[in-house]
Image (spheres, grey):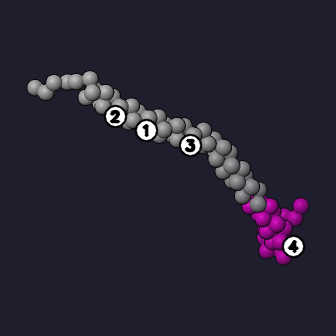
Amino acid sequence: MAEVSNELIFEVLKQVQQRLDRVDHKVDEIKSELIALPGHQISMLQAFQNVYGILGRSDARLDHIERRLELTDAPTP
């Protein structure tokens, strides 16, 4: 059986420490991405609200045009 020396243990511990440093770095990256997600979600919700607002206005304009051209059966307000 091979003898375990302090140098061998030290080398293994250095490798473990390097791997842990890489893991810490990756965890920090993931945390940063997770922190950014709510901001992205808010931006997307605002964009959807803008789209719905534009569609609502377009729908109202289309109804107005149909009434003016008498293309609808809906009563005129």
Horizontal arrangement in the rendering, residue 62 relative to residue 31 (left or right): right
* Label 3 vs 1, first from the N-terminus: 1
Amino acid residing under circle 1: Arg
Viewer-closest of 16 and 5: 5
Please tell me whether residue 71 belongs to the stretch shown in magenta: yes
Pointer 1 local density, CA inside 10 Å: few below 14, some 14–19, many at least 20: few
Tell me: residue 67, above or below residue 46: below
Residue displayed at 87% across by 73% down: 68
Q: Quadrant of the image for the N terminus?
A: top left
Question: Which of marks 4 and 2 precedes in the sequence?
Answer: 2
Residue 25, position in %: x, y? 48, 38
For mark 2, what is the residue?
A: 15
Q: CA distance from mark 3 to mark 4?
A: 52 Å
Q: Inspect the image, locate mark 3, and give the three-letter code of the amino acid beneath it.
A: Glu
The residue drawn where x is 39% and y is 35% is 18
Q: Nearer the viewer, mark 3 or mark 4?
A: 3
Does residue 35 appear left or right of residue 54 in this picture? left
- Three-letter residue code for mark 2: Gln
**Left or right, residue 72 beside residue 24:** right
Q: Secondary structure at mark 2?
A: helix
**Given contact means CB atoms under 8 Å apart, are the residues at marks 2 and 4 in contact?**
no
Q: Which residue is mark 4?
A: 68
Work out how far the residue at label 4 is from the one at label 1, CA to CA, in angstroms. 68 Å
Please, what secondary structure does the residue beneath circle 3 have?
A: helix
| Disc 1: which residue | 22
* Numbered badge on residue 33: 3
Badge 2 density bin: few <14, some 14–19, many ≥20, Cα 10 Å: few
User: Which SS type dominates the magenta stretch?
Assistant: helix
